[in-house]
């Protein structure tokens, strides 16, 4: 049994229920007292995880000092809150404790991956990234799920694998931290585009094309940033892309559907809640321009999200781009 503290009550609640079922002593933290009180009263996270009981054994707290006693810390706050939360947590963590990040995104402005943010703020900790096709709604209910844990320190990833792997959650270890993080972050942009296609009622052919060419764009940028090509064919690449583009659990897809149906990007985000693909579209386009990597789907998504471009026009512009060869090797040779 390990003492596990989870920061954040969204996906964090599902992980808390799962870890409790593994026999660990679990503490769940939130910045918002009203959120904790609601869970205490209802016995579940009604807003984000309705119907999934939160056992009374799980301790609920707003006090980060409780981190001093933990063996494993799971960071489950939104990507924009990772640095601030890590700063607040730093004084309480024992040196060498593994910190697992489950948020999927890139830091706005710095373009840094979230593991890099955590390494800056928590230099005495071992950082692990968890990513892959894993909706909280299904993890919390014990639906079979398979994901990846990646770290620059293999032993740290294996520690997480040993602690959390169970009959309903299978974890694979990966050493390509860059690829695992970029796959998890950038697929949200493609999922927004896939949702827009659904909102426009474009059908299965268009969606399949968006997903297929989308993973190509993600891999192209990833390799330029030092990732391994094969990572994007795995759980944190195509696996996460499939589940995010096809499920109504996906907030990115749901926001995209609303945009395709005529709502503005801001209206859609406000209606759905946290939509990681919205800020990531801007970051991805800035990165692609900086590194001179072509990402036409991400570019058109950015135009729709930030410049009020009509989705139908974005589709036409994608479909009428200059001819290309599908093979990336030949394409990169300029032929």
Image (cartoon, rainbow, N blue to C red):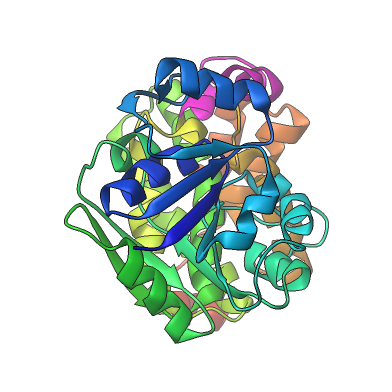
Seen in the image, is 104 located left or right of residue 95? left
Determine which quarter of the picture holds residue 8. top right
Of 7 and 190, the residue lying toward us = 7
The N terminus lies in quadrant: bottom left
Seen in the image, is 124 located left or right of residue 103? right
> Magenta: predominant secondary structure element?
helix
**Residue 27 seen:** yes
Determine which quarter of the picture holds residue 148. bottom left
Give above or below for 265 relative to 100: above
| Magenta segment includes 231 | no
| Magenta segment includes 262 | yes
Determine which quarter of the picture holds residue 115. bottom right
Of 198 and 142, the residue lying toward us = 142
Of 192 and 300, the residue lying toward us = 192
Seen in the image, is 304 located left or right of residue 207? right
Image location (x, y in percent) of residue 113? 66, 65
**Residue 47 seen:** no
- Residue drawn 65% across and 38% down? 278
Image location (x, y in percent) of residue 103? 56, 51
- Residue drawn 66% across and 37% down? 62
Q: Give the range drawn in magenta.
A: 254-272
Of 204 and 177, the residue lying toward us = 177
Image location (x, y in percent) of residue 327? 40, 74
- Residue drawn 38% across and 28% down? 202
* Numbered disc total: 0
Give the farthest residue toward the right.
Answer: 109
Image location (x, y in percent) of residue 314? 60, 35
């Amino acid at each position: 049994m390990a003492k596990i503290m989870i920061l954040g009550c969204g996906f964090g609640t599902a992980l808390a229920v799962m870890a409790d079922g593994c026999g660990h002593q679990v503490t769940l933290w939130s910045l918002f007292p009203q959120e904790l009180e609601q869970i205490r009263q209802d016995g579940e996270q009604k807003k984000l995880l309705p119907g999934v009981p939160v056992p009374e054994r799980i301790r609920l707290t707003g006090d980060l000092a409780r981190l001093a006693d933990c063996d494993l810390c799971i960071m489950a706050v939104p990507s924009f809150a990772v640095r601030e939360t890590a700063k607040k947590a730093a004084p309480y963590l024992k040196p060498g404790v593994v910190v697992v990040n489950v948020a999927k995104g890139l830091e706005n402005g710095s373009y840094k991956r979230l593991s890099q943010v955590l390494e800056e703020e928590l230099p005495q900790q071992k950082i692990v990234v968890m990513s892959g096709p894993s909706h909280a709604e299904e993890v919390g209910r014990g639906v079979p799920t398979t994901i990846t844990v990646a770290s620059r320190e293999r032993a740290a990833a294996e520690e997480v694998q040993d602690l959390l792997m169970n009959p309903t959650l299978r974890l694979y270890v990966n050493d390509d931290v860059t690829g695992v993080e970029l796959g998890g972050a950038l697929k949200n942009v493609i999922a927004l585009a896939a949702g827009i296609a659904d909102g426009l009622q474009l059908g299965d052919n268009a969606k399949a094309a968006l997903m297929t060419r989308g993973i190509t764009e993600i891999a192209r940028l990833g390799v330029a940033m030092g990732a391994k090509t094969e990572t994007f064919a795995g759980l944190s690449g195509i696996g996460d892309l499939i589940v995010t583009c096809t499920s109504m659990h996906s907030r990115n897809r749901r926001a995209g559907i609303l945009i395709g149906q005529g709502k503005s990007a801001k209206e859609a985000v406000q209606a759905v809640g946290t939509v990681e693909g919205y800020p990531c579209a801007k970051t991805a386009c800035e990165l692609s321009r900086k590194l001179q990597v072509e990402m036409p789907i991400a570019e058109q998504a950015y135009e729709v999200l930030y410049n009020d471009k009509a989705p139908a026009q974005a589709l036409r512009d994608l479909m009428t781009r200059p001819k290309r060869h599908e093979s990336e090797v030949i394409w990169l040779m300029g032929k």
